[in-house]
């Protein structure tokens, strides 16, 4: 790069700055949304831990892993969002500590959804095999589910950790101690990282979408036989597809932001704020809806812990 880190930092920070009132308003909106979603997610985790029935079901184990993953992603993303408005630039090594969990968890989400779709497919399209696997040998099934979670994190690591090694091998020590606007492109800025990122994003995209399309169409054929469970699973796969679509939009977010900024240069700050809400927060809002509210079993138990139930005496019987 011909531009020094200091020069690029000033330019990047200036592009992201806003008026004081606007900055406070945006941070309040983001924090309120984050606290609300994390409260719901924390209630779901509490419900999962309180009832043994969920701990023996691969579907709910994968779901609660998605919830924990979303909480980490949401917390780190919002922290980075606040830091960009508070400090504008931070040290590269500190930025790495903050941005790596956000990247890991962002990569985990579509993979987790793909495995959840596969679980739905087995439960609906191969029910006899599913019952054989999950009923007599539940402990083995639980272990296999945790192995799947380990595979998810391993695949994300293989996609992200090379960026760290490339950073340490190619960048001078002065860059690690410099201040930058904390963004993936400004930290892992080499052409090697950018090319590797593009290849890994395409692989993730193809693998996840092939899984979703295959499971959806197979379940759709079963649903034609008026199977209520199959129809519900089909709708669940559709919601997974919509959530994955939003998650995958993160990969084209920089290009889309550039296009919108080029055509609407006076709205650059608003464009970045709206894209953050749509691509980082909205997908995490869908997760509680898919299983937490749509699933009859989980909904029955979670009502005992949500404040909206506990705060109304007329609904006290639900806590019993």
Image (tube, rainbow, N blue to C red):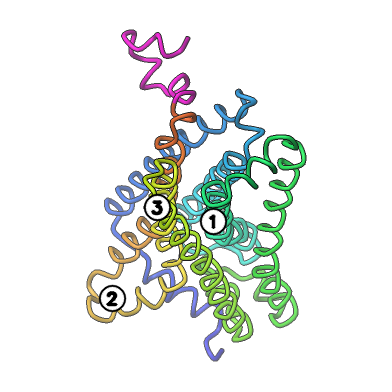
Task: Identify the residue at horizontal 61%, vertical 83% (top origin).
Answer: 190
Q: Tell me: residue 260, above or below residue 91.
A: below
- Left or right, 183 with respect to 308, comes to right
The quarter of the picture where residue 250 lies is bottom left
Asked if residue 250 lies in the magenta stretch, the reply is no
Q: Return the residue at label 1.
A: 109
Camera-nearest label, 2 or 3: 3
Task: Identify the residue at horizontal 33%, vertical 53% (top origin).
Answer: 23
Compare residues 25 and 241 and report the one nearer the observer: 241
Asked if residue 305 lies in the magenta stretch, the reply is yes
Mark earlier in primary sequence (1, 3): 1
Q: Return the residue at label 2.
A: 260
**Residue 78 locus on image (x, y percent):** 47, 51
- Left or right, 20 with respect to 78, comes to left
The quarter of the picture where residue 308 lies is top left
Q: Return the residue at label 3.
A: 239
* Residue contact at pointers 2 and 3, CB within 8 angstroms: no
* Residue contact at pointers 1 and 3, CB within 8 angstroms: no
Camera-nearest label, 2 or 1: 1
Q: Tell me: residue 85, above or below residue 171.
A: above
Q: Residue furthest front?
A: 225
- Residue neighbourhood size for the residue with mark 1, other residues' Cα within 10 Å, grouped as few (<14), some (14–19), many (≥20): many
Residue 291: assigned label: none
Give the dominant element type of the magenta stretch: helix, strand or loop. Answer: helix
**Residue 195 locus on image (x, y percent):** 58, 84
From which residue to which does the magenta span run?
300-320
* Residue contact at pointers 2 and 1, CB within 8 angstroms: no
């Amino acid at each position: 790069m011909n531009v020094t880190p200091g020069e690029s930092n000033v330019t990047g920070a200036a592009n992201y700055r806003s008026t004081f009132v606007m900055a406070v308003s945006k941070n309040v909106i983001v924090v309120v949304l984050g606290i609300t979603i994390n409260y719901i997610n924390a209630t779901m985790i509490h419900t999962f831990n309180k009832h043994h029935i969920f701990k023996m079901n691969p579907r709910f184990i994968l779901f609660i892993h998605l919830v924990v993953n979303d909480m980490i992603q949401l917390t780190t993303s919002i922290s980075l969002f606040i830091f960009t408005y508070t400090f504008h630039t931070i040290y590269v090594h500190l930025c790495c500590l903050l941005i790596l969990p956000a990247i890991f968890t962002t990569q985990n989400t579509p993979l987790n959804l793909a495995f959840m779709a596969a679980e739905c497919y087995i439960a609906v399209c191969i029910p006899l095999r599913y019952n054989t696997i999950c009923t007599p040998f539940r402990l083995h099934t639980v272990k296999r589910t945790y192995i799947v979670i380990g595979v998810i994190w391993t695949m994300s690591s293989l996609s992200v950790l090379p960026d760290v090694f490339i950073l340490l091998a190619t960048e001078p020590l002065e860059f690690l101690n410099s201040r930058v606007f904390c963004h993936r492109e400004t930290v892992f800025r080499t052409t090697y990282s950018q090319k590797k990122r593009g290849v890994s994003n395409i692989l993730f995209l193809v693998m996840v979408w092939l899984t979703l399309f295959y499971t959806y169409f197979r379940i759709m054929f079963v649903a034609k036989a008026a199977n209520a469970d199959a129809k519900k699973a089909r709708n669940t796969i559709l919601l997974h597809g919509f959530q994955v679509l939003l998650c995958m939009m993160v990969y084209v977010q920089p290009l889309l932001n550039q296009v919108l900024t080029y055509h609407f240069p006076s709205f650059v700050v608003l464009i970045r704020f709206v894209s953050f809400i749509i691509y980082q927060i909205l997908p995490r809002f869908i997760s509680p809806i898919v299983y937490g509210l749509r699933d009859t079993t989980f909904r029955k138990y979670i009502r005992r812990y949500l404040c909206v139930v506990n705060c109304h005496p007329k609904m006290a019987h639900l806590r019993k």
